[in-house]
Image (spheres, rainbow, N blue to C red):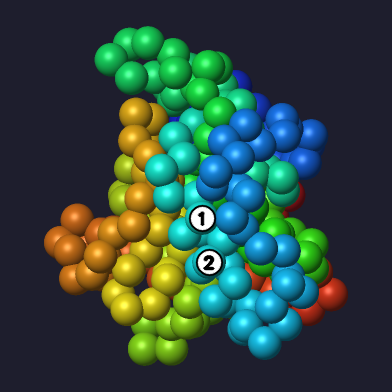
Amino acid sequence: MPFPHTTGGWARRRLLGAALGVGLAPALGAGSAAARPRGEDPGLPLGLEVAAVAAAQLGVPYAWGGGDRLGPSLGFCDEENGYLDGRCLGESTIGFDCSGLSLHCWYRASGGAVELGHYTVAQFHRSAPVDRGGLLPGDLLFFSRPDAPLHHVGIWTGDGAMIHAERTGTLVARVEGVLDLPRWAAEFAGARRPLPLDHRPPTTDH
């Protein structure tokens, strides 16, 4: 998910993060209904539950600004994002953007114990670093370019794969061998593991 680079876009993204949870109830029940809140299978490690919730969202549309605690929600368009071929799809699409997907999966799987902001940079700083060799299902993969620092986040599912919401006009999808693909390997900025609210390190993000 590329970040908005204009003042209005940044402000709207931060406002959306502050209002997390106010979004629409899921309108794509097939994906969200399959997700299990934590406690239905207490023997399943949290990261595996996160990956299972993510897998339940496969096929949900991408919506810039979409996704909250409840699931997919209505997106929007700003000065640069939410458009496809010059047409604003964000304002008419219920779905996820990349950080909306990760915040929903972690919140749902943890029963509310892990709550991430709807902002990729904040999610990076509110999580603990993980070495590539120590990746576990549910960990978050972050991607960066010189023109778009920390522009995208996806959910590691194990076996070399990532589930993510990539861009307007696509669906939530699974990418096999993600860190071996030249495009994603070149932009890989590190992996992080979200922490419960009472275990987060101090942060300086606002």
Residue occupied by mark 1: 56
Residue 63 higher or lower than 177, as above or below = above
Residue found 66% across the figure and 37% down from its top:
26
Residue 64 can be seen in this image: no
Q: Quadrant of residue 43?
A: bottom right
x, y (%) of residue 142? 43, 61
Residue count near mark 2 (Cα–Cα under 10 Å), binned few <14, some 14–19, many ≥20: some
In the rendered structure, find residue 40 and report the number of the disc placed on it. none
Q: Give the percent coordinates (x, y) of residue 32.
A: 61, 48
Residue 2 screen position, x and y as percent = 41, 39
Identified by mark 2, the residue type is Ala
> As displayed, is residue 188 above or below residue 152?
below
Secondary structure of the residue carrying tag 1 is: helix
Q: Are marks 1 and 2 in contact (CB under 8 Å)?
A: yes
| Left or right: 31 in relation to 184 | right
| Amino acid type at image mark 1 | Ala
Report the disc number at residue 52.
Answer: 2
Image vertical order of residue 188 relative to residue 172, above or below: below
Cα–Cα span, label 1 and label 2: 6 Å
Say if residue 153 shows up in the picture. Answer: yes
Q: Residues within 10 Å of mark 1 (few under 14, many from 20)?
A: some
